[in-house]
Amino acid sequence: MTGTPAPYAAAGISILVPVSNEALSVQQTLLQLVAIMRRLGQPYEILVIDDGSTDASRQVIAAVADPALRVITHRRNQGYGAALTHGLRQARFPQLVITDADGTYPLERIPELLAGLDQHAMVIGARTGRQVHTAAARRLVKWGLHRLAERITGRAIPDLNSGLRAMRRAAILPLEPILPQRFSWTSTVTVALLLGGQAVAFVPIDYHRRQGVSKVHPIRDTLRALGCILRAAAFGAAQRPGVGQDTV
């Protein structure tokens, strides 16, 4: 396992997995991803971005044997968004998938999300399924940001900041100047792509209880998210208008 990227390839899938003290769940997440991608039968890599973990995450990750697994290590914690952006720069394939390492997302839906990239720049796993577990303290805050984003974009947005989504790398790279270091990375790309006229689809998924402790700070991260949404709105509005969102 190495942080050095192989030469860029014209076809294949890069899966970005940011990790920050996820020793309880990261191994199972990676083993499941390996099994899914081997069944899919396409070229792939799994980029684990260890964002300054201080628990046993590093040792647990090292126990997963797969030649397509690469680990990028941050000596100190830089933030969820910084980890994803680092993975974006290092990815060698044109199709991207992001997911968390905490056991919350139904990884078996990844092939479905990837299939949607034939006609969309981004396919988001919208946490609107039958089983969705969200901390009560975060629901009101998420609702307010969600409504603001819908008002800005003029679009229905079933899930603004889902951490399970498939994307075309070429659609995300131009957004790098506005990508935040912390938890509003996903909200930023959602708003910017919609306002930029990119085709975005939402697929309903379930959302499980996380293993370990959440890294989100409700007040601080909400204020950051608000600023990121406004920056994304300004950036996206400057892009060429086009087709909006659909539902797969």
Image: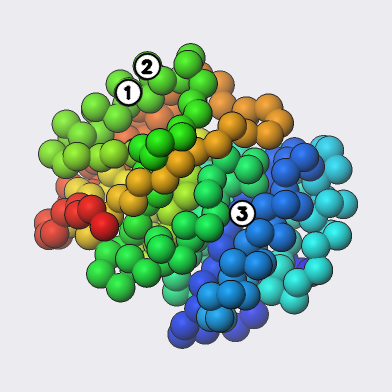
In this view, the residue in front, 232 or 96, is: 96
Residue under the image location 57 percent in, 40 percent down: 104
Name the side, left or right, on which 216 lies relative to 52: left
For label 2, the SS is: helix
In this view, the residue in front, 39 or 57, is: 39
Q: Name the residue under label 2.
A: 140
Residue 40 appears at what percent x and percent y? 53, 75
The disc at residue 49 is none
What colour scheme does the image use? rainbow
For label 3, the SS is: strand
The disc at residue 17 is 3
Residue 92 appears at what percent x and percent y? 55, 75
Q: Mark 1 points at which residue?
A: 143
Pointer 1 with pointer 2, Cβ within 8 A: yes
In this view, the residue in front, 235 or 164, is: 164
Residue under the image location 62 percent in, 75 percent down: 38
Q: Which of marks 3 and 2 is nearer the N terminus?
A: 3
- Kind of residue at badge 1: Trp
- Kind of residue at badge 3: Val
For the C terminus, the image quarter is bottom left
For the N terminus, the image quarter is bottom right
- How crowded is the residue under tag 1: few (<14 C-alpha within 10 Å), some, or many (20+)? few
Residue 107 appears at what percent x and percent y? 55, 54
- Kind of residue at badge 2: Leu
Rounded to the nearest angstrom, the CA distance separating label 3 from label 2 is 27 Å
Q: Can residue 115 be seen in this view?
A: yes
